[in-house]
Amino acid sequence: MIAEKPRKSFWQLFNLSFGFFGIQIGFALQNANMSRIFQSLGESLDNLPALWVAAPLTGLLVQPIVGHYSDRTWTRLGRRRPYFLAGAVLAALSLVIMPMAQSLLLAAMMLWILDASLNISMEPFRAFVGDSLRKDQHTLGYAVQTAFIGAGAVAGSLFPYLLTGLGVANTDAAGGVPDTVRYSFWFGGAALFVAVLWTIVTTSEYSPDEMQAFAEAYTDEPQAPPMRALAARGPSTALAWLVAGVVVIALVWRLELEKEVYLLGGLFAAYGLISLAAIHLARAGRDNNLLSHIVGDFSGMPPIMKRLSLVQFFSWSALFIMWIYTTPVVAQAMFATTDAGSAAFNDAGNWVGVLFAVYNGVAAVAALTLLPWLAARMGKVRTHALCLLCGAAGFGSFLVIRDPQWLIASEIGIGIAWASILAMPYAILASSLPQAKLGIFMGLFNVFVVLPQLLVATVMGSLLKAFFPTEPIWTMAFAAAVLALAALATLRVPEPTS
């Protein structure tokens, strides 16, 4: 007889996701302040995407690997919680060191380490909800998680603004990172560690035997269908990726494009080589290895996940544009400055922190109120499409607003979209993914969060330099367009039956 997971109370749901509050403080500090830190250390606007490329690249590498191994881990601490703890320790240390960087190289290296650490903690949290909750609580579980993401981002985004109000210096006489940013990162590191530790201490995980009783097997054996499909695949697709990578690299060299586009070509070529290696191993019967598992599961994604992946790709393209360019856009268009060392630029940086707090605050409220209400009336898919259109309108309004106060209205639309991006795709997927491989599939789904960020980081600098080198505000028009495309792509996703 198959047992049913017990229903979780509100406070149990609270404890399950409270760690995400701390993780999102780290992401918010990173997203709202890294462009400011890079420019304070002397970097130009054109080179910001190249420096930001570290963040999505670490996510691309870390999340599938962590997902794969967290599916197969069982220790005295549990299945997912060892990864929460390891990532939290590393992320907290990175937040302490980051604002003390005196060089661009050290700042870029610490961004890489910080993002990798946050991903180590974050990826298992998605699977943790699926592990812990019965299917009829998945939507509420991800909504609570989204609310904590919004609340954590509000706290992280507001730190510099609040510290300025308390009299902490918001500029640095030597042209370095101001004290408001420095102290914010230190407070954020402490908050991140305490929040993750709270979830670890107040929760438990179902043992492998209990998961078997729920008919949600814990296994370290290869999943047969993806492995057989991988072994049966010809090399043509893998070779196409390899050739595409070589072509991109050649075009960058021949057309003298921005050097970061080399990374895009390198990634295409690398995926082609990895796929060829995985096919060879699977055909040789050596399929119980990390490489074959990840490539096999990637090629064997459920159809609904493939359609949602396109939605994620467009959605996160817009978000990454926002995180990179909002500070220079607001500084130039609303505060009339491009001087990264000026008081006006740092005032703009603080206001961007407030704007980011607004959209995250709206997301926290919308996740628990607006989204469930809309989903009950029009379904999860149409709800997601409508919310994405609200975000597209918010980005588009940057082109006509010149009073920074009015940007709060823009952020309301973006906040509604952000709430839906964080909750609805996972709620749609929750009941359709095989529970024994929830970690790896969540990690692979997040590849389509990372790939658009890499595309923006490698290509947007070239587009900015070629078409509007002194007008970064047009990046917001591009963000609005791709978010509208995400809304259209959502309508191709079938409405889940449960």
Image (cartoon, rainbow, N blue to C red):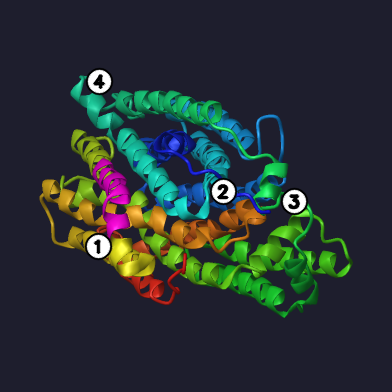
Q: The disc labelled 2 sits on which kind of residue?
A: Ala
Q: Identify the residue position indicated by label 3 in the image.
A: 219
Residue 1 coordinates in the image, percent (x, y)? 68, 54
Residue 416 coordinates in the image, percent (x, y)? 28, 55
Side (left or right) of 413 relative to 192: left
Say which label, 2 or 3, has the lower sequence index. Answer: 2
Residue 16 coordinates in the image, percent (x, y)? 49, 37
Residue 9 coordinates in the image, percent (x, y)? 43, 38
Q: Given contact means CB atoms under 8 Å apart, are the residues at marks 1 and 3 in contact? A: no
Q: Nearer the viewer, mark 4 or mark 3?
A: 3
Q: In the structure shown, which secondary structural element does the residue marked by tag 4 occupy?
A: loop
Q: Identify the residue position indicated by label 1 in the image.
A: 390
Label 1 to label 4, Cα distance in Å? 36 Å
Q: Mark 4: few, some, or many residues within 10 Å (few <14, many ≥20)?
A: some
Q: Mark 1: few, some, or many residues within 10 Å (few <14, many ≥20)?
A: many
The residue sitting at 51% across, 34% down in the picture is 106
The residue sitting at 49% across, 44% down in the picture is 7
Label 2 to label 1, Cα distance in Å? 28 Å
Label 4 to label 3, Cα distance in Å? 53 Å
Q: The disc labelled 3 sits on which kind of residue?
A: Thr
Relative to 152, does residue 433 appear above or below in the rendering? below
Query: Is residue 431 visible from the viewing direction of this image?
Result: yes
Relative to 257, does residue 149 appear above or below in the rendering? above
Q: Identify the residue position indicated by label 2 in the image.
A: 127
Label 2 to label 3, Cα distance in Å? 15 Å
Q: Nearer the viewer, residue 369 or 196?
A: 369
Q: Which residues are magenta?
A: 357-373
